[in-house]
Amino acid sequence: MEFYRIVISGVIQGVGFRPFVYREAVKRGITGFVMNKGSRVEIVASRSSILEAFKNPPPLAYISSVRVSRFSSDDAYDGFSIIESSGEGNSYDFPPDSYLCEDCIAELRHGSDRRHGYYFITCTNCGPRFSMINSLPYDRLNTAMSKFEMCEECRYEYENPGSRRYHAQTIACRNCGPRLVFVDKINGLSIINDPERNDALAAACKKIAERQIVAVKGVGGFHLCCLADKEPVSMLRGLKMGRLHKPFAVMVRDLDMLSGIADYSEEEAALLKSPARPILVVKKKEPRAMKWISELDSLGVMLPYTALHYLMFDYLDKPLIMTSANLAEHPLIIEDAELIGIDYVLTHERGVVNRCDDSVIKVITPRDEAREQAVVFLRRSRGFVPLPIRIAGNSPSILALGGGLKNAFAVIKDGQAYLSQHLGSTAYIQGGEFFDSALRRMIKAVCFKPELIACDANPAYYTSSLADRLASEFHAPVMRIQHHHAHVAGVAAEYSLTDYVGIAADGAGLGEQAVWGGEVFDVSGCCFKRVGHLEQMPMIGGDAAALKPRRMLYGILSGFLSNKELAGLNRQLPLYTEAELRVFDKQLSQGFNIALTTSAGRLLDAAAALLGLCNRNTYEGRAAMLLESAASGKPVYRLEPVIEKGEFLVLKTTPLFAFMLDKLRAGASRQELARLVHDYIAEGLYSIAEKAAMRQHKQIVFSGGVAANRYVTGFMLDRGVLVNQQVPCGDGGLCLGQGYIGLTAVEGVD
């Protein structure tokens, strides 16, 4: 008898794909079986008509390839069945964590449903995946649900082909699933939730309503939750070290609640309601509203994505702060014992296998309505990881380790790049341990042996020394890649470009005898040539200038003002003490502890200091973000970019500051001048790139942390410049660029 063997690759495990195939086969009268075979799904079918079903797969599935072969067999199949999984395979194609689907929400709300009010309700179409998977194949035994034995009713649904929970590995109910627990450390109480009364949940929400802070265990780790009111948020800032000014994320019950505090477009609403349920940066209704949450003109907002979130809003009909429970630059907390200094905890019995922060995205709209918007990742994590990014060519196996801050790594094989979740900083021991454990888990899951290891050229990064250790372990060469080259190559990877002109603008990256950060490159394959950059600026005190923007400003002003003029300016605009003027002048004259930089980020810092917007970067990028928030309305001033010709095309920045000083003295507003700064940098860097691109008709790309700025990137989009839209424009996307450069170096791209 003739049969068809169909092998399917993609995101097809943990999404109800086998039950879907079963139902479609039975509907069509097809005999055979379906099974998970490692990372793939294999189907043996008596007729090829089953292929028609794949045009409309389950909502969370993504089919990347279908291979069909015919064979003859004497086997006879009595109907169609799902059979036991095989452990073969070495792909990382399983789904990210997803929101709660509408069917489950309906059951959560339906008084007579047996999962009414159950905080871990899920089905094959929704719920946690990546955060709870230990290994493939995706079976309950390999997840955080392995210790919860199904009750008879759940077992019946699990084995019933007509059920939405047929072979749903996350299946649970109040009788057999994880329990919710509220811990009150002040009074020494521990309340195990009664399913009928939801008393643990009610107790936690009561504390939140009383303006207390409660740690809430979520999908990928703990959040710190409180009302989005001034008093509890002030308490939270005192509790969460390193968050003196940094904005907090806000969770709202629905779009109606969001409408009261922020403006959003239809496109932004669709992103908020998408299965990934990211944090989305949107404009406040009033720029100065809710300053205790965000000192910017924007808010990071998200909608509920678990049953627990929906149930909390039954008790709390107000916006809630939902911020990651971690110290600054440290990994997200996933264990109850790590919650030191937190008096109230709402936890549960299901473990977190892969800690995973919320993703953060931002929509940037060009002024030219004919141009498409860009969806820019600030952080790519829950809801998107580990979805692969397709890249051109049959790539060798490459491990790319990224940089040092806001980091992620990438495993590249078989034309796919698998990025890790957001791993944060590796500057601390805990960050390095988290990076190592996440890397080892992925290497094991995909049976990965790198042929090349790529890392940043900065030897001070933890990942650079890690590259050497891994090279010895896997007997693979190390390729050290310039930071900004990796930034622009990340965009090239998304669009399969090999020859292009790249603009890289960020806070800092190791360059040749200077700190780079405002660069234009002509790129061919794996090689780049620096063709232009911002004017060099002195960083007084080196890294201290990144924390104190006034130091950057003094260095720039001293380039065109005498000491007498600086003293006179300081009387008009009191920026420095007399002692600071003396010390900074002496440092510059003697060249003591001075670093030179072409960083666009540091330039924005200096402009923010001149306009009185920021004296200290209490979090990364603060001054630049305050400058972006201050810019408003249509451009009032335009300054023709001054580009100096020489070995490189240099965008002069001293004329910009001289112009700003003249306008400040004439009474120009901070808003008008803040907008000018963005437009001058964008137009100047683009002009340099355009000259290089026109010679060989190359595409221009733009990346780096400054690409998250709506004015600079909006300018670039108006002119057809390509930006990152699948990975972060900041350091979280470096690994993709490193891997792509490694790929072109080893084999080239077809």
Image (cartoon, helix red, strand yellow):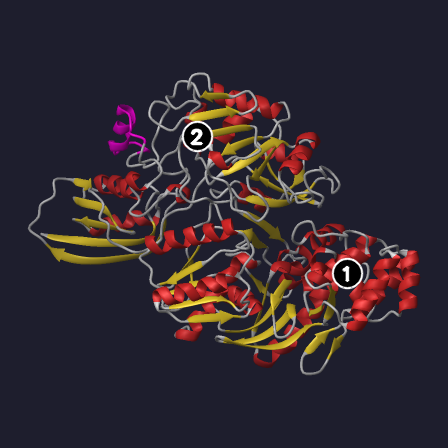
Image location (x, y in percent) of residue 6? 23, 53
Residue 639 seen by the camera: no
In the picture as drawn, the residue positioned furthest to the bottom comes out as: 646
Q: Is residue 125 above or below residue 488?
A: above
Amino acid type of disc 2? Answer: His
Q: Which mark is residue 348?
A: 2
Q: Is residue 160 magenta?
A: yes
**For residue 483, above or below residue 308:** below
Relative image position of residue 195 (x, y in whole percent): 42, 19
Where the C terminus falls, by quadrant?
bottom left
**Residue at the top extreme of this rendering:** 197
Q: Residue at x 93, y 62 (%)?
A: 568
Residue 351 - label: none
What amino acid type should be assigned to the residue bearing mark 1? Arg
**Percent of width and height locating residue 143:** 34, 40
The residue carrying mark 1 is 551
Range of the magenta residues? 148-165
Pinpoint residue 346: horizontal percent, then vertical percent: 50, 28
Question: What is the distance, in whole Å, between disc 1 and disc 2 at their CAs?
Answer: 49 Å
- The answer to whether residue 385 of the structure is visible from this angle is yes
Tell me if 399 is positioned left or right of 619 in this view.
left
478 versus 724 height, above or below: below
Circle 1 crowding by C-alpha within 10 Å: few under 14, some 14–19, many from 20? many
Judge by depth and name the residue closer to the eye, 315 or 466.
Answer: 466
* Closer to us: 370 or 718: 718
Question: Relative to the observer, which residue lies in front, 458 or 572?
Answer: 458
**Membership of 198 in magenta stretch:** no
Determine the residue positioned at 61% across, 23% down: 209
Secondary element at tag 2 = strand
Q: Could you say which quadrant of the image residue 545 lies in?
A: bottom right
- The image quadrant that residue 141 belongs to is top left
Query: Looking at the image, which is closer to me, 610 or 14?
Result: 610
